[in-house]
Image: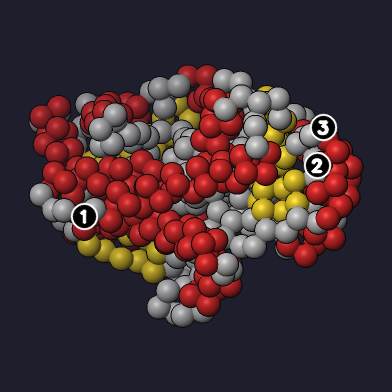
């Protein structure tokens, strides 16, 4: 149903997908109500207090609240009764088998469905295996036979750290449904974005669901391909950055996600790749490439660990500093973060592991027993025997290398993201070990190291 202007929309789930979606739809002129079972979170959101770090999101939410087009509640009843469409934006974490856990998706949809009085459009925004919409439709029909439900798959393509921009100005909007009425409502919801130049793709539900998993699997593949090339370049004395730059100039390949380093992490690629692998196995198709993507990604971390062992020899009583702990810059998300996987290996090897991240210290320390954190990069580097660049925050791009070298016990930098130039690091007096590129070891550092051992 329509409000004073725009449509009335419900969002179930006040997380990394639900909040940017809600803020964007409110900014487009729709009237959005977000519901979540986490009462303290809902109360805080009413004051525009965001539960995680995402650039621009707090301002977007505050703007929606001030406009009167965005509200929050723990009660799903009005969301079901008053909304033209309800978006399911809850997590789909991996089970032990790798399959997506869809319990939250089912519970959230049923919580809303029981309050529906007529017809309701239910939109899957969460990433789910193809065929989920069919099962969800049956569950909704059984839960409330008095109402009718039209299912839509509308996968999110949000990048953490850029979620606001991606919500307001997406490259494409994908909508899958077998209902002409539902497709009409979805087009009305997104019309301002379509008018802004976004590609708008309509398809069936199963195709839309599969497309999301296919996109994430392919992006993960590109990252792992670059990391495998890094190993080859190290063995052949070639330069992986130059190799991938040449590849990226080919318009059929493109430069995105071709950066060798510590590998991918976060809440999407690892779990979605595992869920996709389980899906194709269940469908009876042999797709071993998916398993290789993960293996190479894991190898990226162990390869950097080996570089640390090579330059430090014994790790016991050595202070190893991790610069960056979140899985990527622009977020405090540490789920499946490569830096934390590396921290666990170092802790188990007996090293004193100290991390510094502009926003993710607290979350990272809670995930890795034995990981210490510092309040500043210079505090972290004080007395360090080795620093490892794990996340390419802008703060590290402008790091004063002369001050860093003076603070460290050994001037050794392992660059897990190829952020720095070898010549600059050599001039600063560092032993510099990048990924898939030639290392440098100034004579001055060799003397310091020999005197310290």
Residue under label 3, please give it: 383
The answer to whether 141 is drawn above or below residue 406 in the figure is: above
Q: Quadrant of the N terminus?
A: top left
Secondary structure of the residue carrying tag 2 is: helix
Residue in the picture at 56% in, 43% down: 306
N-terminal-most mark, 3 or 2:
3
Packing grade of label 2 (10 A; few <14, some 14-19, many >=20) is some
Label 1, secondary structure: give it. loop
Q: Which residue is mark 2?
A: 449
Question: Where in the figure is residue 3, as x and y percent of width and height?
Answer: 41, 45
At x 16%, y 53%, the residue is 286
Decide: few, some or many residues near mark 3? Use Cα within 10 Å; few <14, some 14-19, many ≥20.
many
Q: Position of residue 261 (x, y in %)?
A: 55, 54
Residue 400's disc number: none
Tag 3 or tag 1, which sits nearer the N-term? 1
Pair 1/3: label in front = 3
Position of residue 160 relative to residue 319, above or below, is below
Q: Is residue 259 left or right of residue 7?
A: right
What distance separates the C-alpha of mark 2 from that of mark 1?
48 Å
As drawn, is 263 to the left or to the right of 218? right
Dividing the picture into quarters, in which one does residue 143 lie?
top left
Q: Is residue 237 above or below residue 395?
A: below
Q: Determine whether, in the image, residue 215 is placed left or right of residue 51.
A: left
What percent of the width, then of the height, locates residue 14? Answer: 46, 33
Per the model, the C-alpha gap separating discs 1 and 3 is 48 Å
Q: Which residue is more in the foreground, 153 or 264?
A: 264
Residue at 26% in and 63% down: 202
Q: Distance from label 3 to label 2 (Cα)?
A: 13 Å
Q: Residue furthest bottom?
A: 250
């Amino acid at each position: 149903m329509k409000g004073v202007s725009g449509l009335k929309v419900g969002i179930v789930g006040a997380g990394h997908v639900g909040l940017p979606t809600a803020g964007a739809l409110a900014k487009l002129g729709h009237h959005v109500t977000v519901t979540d079972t986490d009462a303290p979170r809902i109360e805080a959101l009413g004051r525009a207090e965001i539960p995680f770090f995402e650039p621009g999101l707090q301002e977007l939410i505050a703007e929606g609240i001030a406009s009167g087009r965005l509200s929050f509640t723990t009660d799903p009843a009005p969301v079901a009764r008053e909304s033209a469409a309800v978006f399911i934006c809850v997590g789909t974490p991996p089970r032990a088998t790798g399959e997506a856990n869809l319990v939250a998706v089912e519970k959230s949809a049923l919580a809303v469905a029981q309050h529906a009085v007529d017809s309701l459009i239910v939109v899957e925004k969460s990433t789910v295996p193809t065929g989920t919409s069919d099962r969800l439709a049956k569950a909704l029909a059984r839960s409330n036979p008095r109402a009718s439900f039209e299912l839509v798959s509308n996968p999110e393509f949000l990048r953490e750290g850029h979620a606001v921009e991606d919500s307001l100005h997406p490259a494409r909007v994908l909508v899958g449904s077998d209902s002409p009425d539902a497709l009409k409502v979805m087009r009305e919801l997104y019309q301002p974005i379509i008018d802004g130049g976004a590609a708008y793709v309509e398809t069936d539900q199963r195709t839309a669901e599969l497309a999301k998993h296919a996109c994430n699997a392919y992006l993960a593949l590109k990252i792992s391909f670059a990391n495998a090339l890094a190993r080859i370049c190290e063995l052949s004395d070639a330069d992986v950055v130059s190799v991938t730059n040449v590849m990226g100039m080919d318009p059929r390949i493109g430069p995105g996600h071709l950066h060798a380093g510590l590998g991918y992490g976060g809440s999407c690629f690892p779990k979605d790749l595992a869920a996709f692998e389980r899906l194709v196995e269940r469908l009876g198709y042999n797709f071993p490439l998916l398993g290789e993507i993960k293996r190479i990604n894991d190898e990226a971390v162990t390869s950097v660990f080996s570089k640390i062992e090579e330059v430090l020899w014994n790790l016991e009583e050595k202070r190893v500093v991790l610069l960056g702990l979140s899985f990527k810059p622009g977020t405090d998300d540490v789920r499946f973060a490569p830096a934390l996987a590396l921290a666990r290996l170092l802790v188990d090897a007996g090293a004193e592991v100290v991390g510094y991240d502009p926003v993710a210290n607290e979350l990272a320390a809670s995930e890795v027993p034995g990981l210490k954190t510092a309040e500043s990069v210079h505090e972290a580097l004080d007395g360090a025997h080795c620093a490892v660049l794990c996340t390419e925050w802008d703060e590290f791009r402008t790091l004063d290398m002369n001050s860093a070298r003076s603070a460290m016990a050994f001037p050794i930098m392992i660059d897990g993201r190829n952020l720095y130039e070898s010549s600059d690091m050599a001039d600063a007096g560092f032993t510099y070990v990048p990924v898939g590129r030639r290392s440098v070891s100034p004579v001055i550092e060799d003397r310091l190291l020999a005197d310290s051992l």
